Image (cartoon, coloured by chain):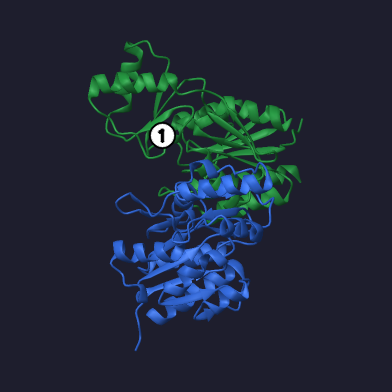
Chain colours: A blue, B green
Amino acid sequence: MKILIRLVAVDIDGTLTFKDRKLDLAAVEAIRKAESAGLPVVLATGNVLTFAEAAATMLGTSGPLIAEDGGIVFDQAIKQEHVLGGRVEADRGLAALERAFGSLKQTRSSAVRLTGLTLERTIPVEDASKVFQHEGLSLVAVDSGFAIHIRSPEVNKGNALRKVSSISRVPLVEIAAIGDGPNDIEMLRVAGISFAVANSADEVKRACTHVTTSPYGKGAAEAIESILSVRR
Amino acid sequence: MKILIRLVAVDIDGTLTFKDRKLDLAAVEAIRKAESAGLPVVLATGNVLTFAEAAATMLGTSGPLIAEDGGIVFDQAIKQEHVLGGRVEADRGLAALERAFGSLKQTRSSAVRLTGLTLERTIPVEDASKVFQHEGLSLVAVDSGFAIHIRSPEVNKGNALRKVSSISRVPLVEIAAIGDGPNDIEMLRVAGISFAVANSADEVKRACTHVTTSPYGKGAAEAIESILSVRR
C-alpha cells in the first residue's frame, strides 16, 4: 500500500542549517520545490513564534508553524495562534533551580515565551532534571545546544504535530517529519514516515523510519527529494 | 581618492527578497561572500528585532542589526540592544487616528514594538499624516506595503546607521548602504556610497549614488559584487 504524503514537518536548527545555524541553500531549494509541488512545509522549532514566522516568510513555507518546542502552533492561513501549554510550572521549576544553584540567567527570548522558558547553559541539564524530580515538578529539561529548555512534558513537537494534523485535516499517517535533535523525537514518532538527518544522535535515529546519508541541510534536502519522488 | 568600504548596510524586504518577501538565494550568496571577504553586513529592517536576529542567524551576518525602522540597534558581538526612541508619541497618534477614523487594528508585531507602532493598511497613509499635522503631533506615517508604520521622525534608519558607525568605529563615509523603500532614504543619504535596487521608487533612486540594473535580490547581489570588486 502506498501512502500519499500531504504535509512535511521540518525542524530548523541542525536540520535545515549547518552546525552554525546558517541555512543550507540546498535545503531551502528543496523546501521551495516541495511547496511548488503542492506539498506544504511545516517549520518546527524550539525558538519563539516570531523566529518561526521570519523563517517561513524568508523561506516561503505555507504550512502551520510549530514554535517553542511545540508549545505554540500558528495557522499561517488564517493567522491563528494556538497556545498548547503554559509556563507556570516552568517558572516554579526555575525557582527550584535557583534555590539549588543560585541565580540563573534566562536567554533573551525567554521573557516572551508563553509555554516554557530557556536558560543559558551554565548548569548540567541532568542536574536540572534531578532537581525537578526531587521537588515533584512535572517538567523536562532539554539541552538544545543553544539553551536549556524547561517545559512541561506535554509541551512537545509530537503533540503540536497532532494539532497541525487536526487544523490541516491531514491524518498523521500522511505527514512526514524530518529532524535531528532529542526535542524532535515525539514529532518523528507520531509522523507517518520520519527522517533523521545523518548528524542526529542515535536515540533520534532509532525513533525514525529512515536515516539520511547526508548530514544537516543536505540530509533534509535528500529526505524531501525522496518524499517527492514517491509522490510522482 | 579611493575609499575603502568596511561595512555594508542592507534592507531586507524588497532588497534581499523577491516581491513576496522570499529570500533571493543569489542575494544570500553575495552576503556570505561579503562576510567571508571580511566585509560585515548590517541588516536593516522595519520589522522587530527578533525578525532581524532570525535573518542574521539564518543568513550569517555579523554586523550590528537595525530593527523597527531604526528605533533599535543591536550589537550582535556583545548582545547589547540600543533603543533609539520611544512609542509614547506614536500611541498618542493612534488615539488621534481612532478619534478620526474609529477603531483601528494594530499588526501582530505592534504590541512588542518599543519605538513606534504598526497598523493594518485600512486607512490611506496621507490621511494619517494630515491628522498628525492637524493635532500638532511630531509623527511620520509610512506605508511599507505590509503595514502603516507610525513613528517619531528622529526614529529612522539614517540615525540608526550613525549609531552603527559609532559602535563599530567605522566612519559613515566607509559604509555602503543598499535599499529600495522610502524608509531606507535617510540611511542611503548618510552612507558613503549608496545603491537603490532597480525596483526602487524614483525618490529612493534620487537619494543614492548608484542605481543597480537588476531589481530586488539580484540588484543587492550586483551592488555587493560591485563593492567587493573595488576592495580588491
Residue ID for mark 1 = B111
Secondary structure beneath label 1: helix
| Residue A168 appears in the picture as rendered | yes
Q: Position of residue B136 (x, y in %)?
A: 37, 10
Which residue is painted at 45% across and 24% down in the image?
B87
Q: Position of residue B117 (x, y in %)?
A: 41, 29
Q: Amino acid at mark 1?
A: Ala
Residue A9, above or below B178: below
Q: How many marks?
A: 1
Chain that bears disc 1: B
User: Along the line of sight, which residue is nearer the eye, A145 or B104?
Assistant: A145
Q: Position of residue A162 (x, y in %)?
A: 36, 66
User: Along the line of sight, which residue is nearer the eye, A111 or A137?
Assistant: A137
Query: The C terminus of chain A is located in which quarter?
Result: bottom left
Quarter where residue B209 is shown? top right
Which residue is painted at 37% across and 36% down in the image?
B147
Give the residue furthest to the left. B102
User: Along the line of sight, which residue is nearer the eye, B161 or B72?
Assistant: B72
Question: For the residue carrying disc 1, how many other residues have a C-alpha within 10 Å: few (<14), some (14-19), or many (20+)?
Answer: few
Residue A187, above or below A81: below
